[in-house]
Image (tube, helix red, strand yellow):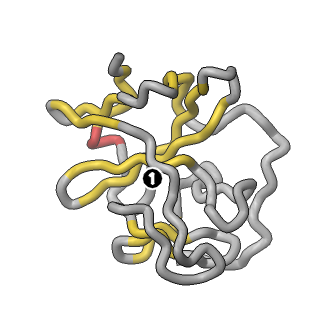
Amino acid sequence: MATLVTSVDDIPEDGSYLFTVEAADGETEEVILVRLEDGVSAWKNFCQHETDQRLDLGEGVARRDDQIICPKHGSAFDVGSGYCGNGPAAGSTLEEVDVTVRHGQVYLTDDDLEFSHEGGSDEDDTPGSSSHLRF
């Protein structure tokens, strides 16, 4: 079943749109939407190098050109494929979440996840970044 998440217009061109989903086991996970030249991609909100490191800390991802930058170690993930070509996460790929765009609206179409709410999870135990990287 497709669930409306947001409008493409609500996704910042150089950042991300953060929302929370619930898995079948009841666990919540964060997902980021990023704009592409020809659509939208959706990724689970964590770096492949350290899975407790969020890419979007609540203010959008850091982006450089067509890459999402991990705020802790600087690994750069392609916004379209999720593949990382450098840094500690080199050779890994972000975990994709299935979404569909219809008439300018983004729908969650991943059978394993249910839309919970806009924004991040309510958990306060997620570690922040100690990095001083800014883009």
Q: Which residue ends up furthest to the bottom in the rendered image? A: 86
- Identify the residue at image location x=61%, y=49%: 58
Q: Which residue is mark 1?
A: 16
Q: Where residue 22 sits: x, y (%)?
A: 60, 25
In which quarter of the view is residue 3 placed?
Answer: top left
- Identify the residue at image location x=72%, y=63%: 50
At mark 1, the secondary structure is loop
- Identify the residue at image location x=57%, y=36%: 119
Q: Which residue ends up furthest to the front in the rendered image? A: 91
Q: Where residue 72 sits: x, y (%)?
A: 70, 72
Answer with left or right where residue 90 lies relative to residue 35: right
- Identify the residue at image location x=79%, y=48%: 126
Q: Where residue 78 sits: x, y (%)?
A: 40, 69
Q: Is residue 80 above or below residue 88?
A: above
Q: Where residue 103 sits: x, y (%)?
A: 15, 31
Pick whichever, 93 or 14, lies toward us: 93
| Quadrant that contains the N terminus | top left
